[in-house]
Amino acid sequence: MKTYTCYYCEHDTESAHLITFFQGQQEREELLCDTCYADWLESLKSEP
Ligand SMILES: [Zn+2]
């Protein structure tokens, strides 16, 4: 089974979530594991 490396915690994960975010002017796509994806969603909610 293919695994992915989480962009945030750098652990291998089998279920990856693709996120898109802007870093300066540049749009980036990265993969997050379940835990980091949940954290990322939370951080979106808390930011204006
Ligand atoms: Zn992670």
Image (cartoon, helix red, strand yellow):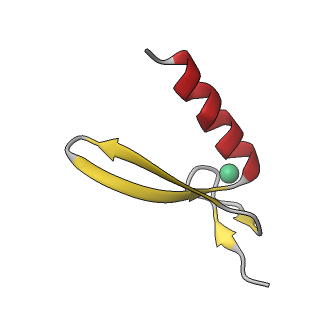
Which residue is found at the position 40% from the left and 45% from the top?
Answer: 21
Which residue is found at the position 49% from the left and 58% from the top?
Answer: 30
13 vs 21: above or below: below
> Dividing the image into 4 quarters, which one contains the N terminus?
bottom right
Image-based side of 1 in relation to 36, left or right: right
Pinpoint residue 11: horizontal percent, then vertical percent: 70, 61
Pinpoint residue 9: horizontal percent, then vertical percent: 64, 51
Q: Quadrant of residue 25?
A: top left
Image-based side of 48 in relation to 32, left or right: left
21 vs 5: above or below: above
Image-based side of 1 in relation to 28, left or right: right
Which residue is found at the position 23% from the left and 40% from the top?
Answer: 24
Which residue is found at the position 75% from the left and 64% from the top?
Answer: 15
- Which residue appears farthest toward the left when viewing the image? 25
The one nearer the camera, 48 or 2, is: 48
The one nearer the camera, 45 or 10, is: 45
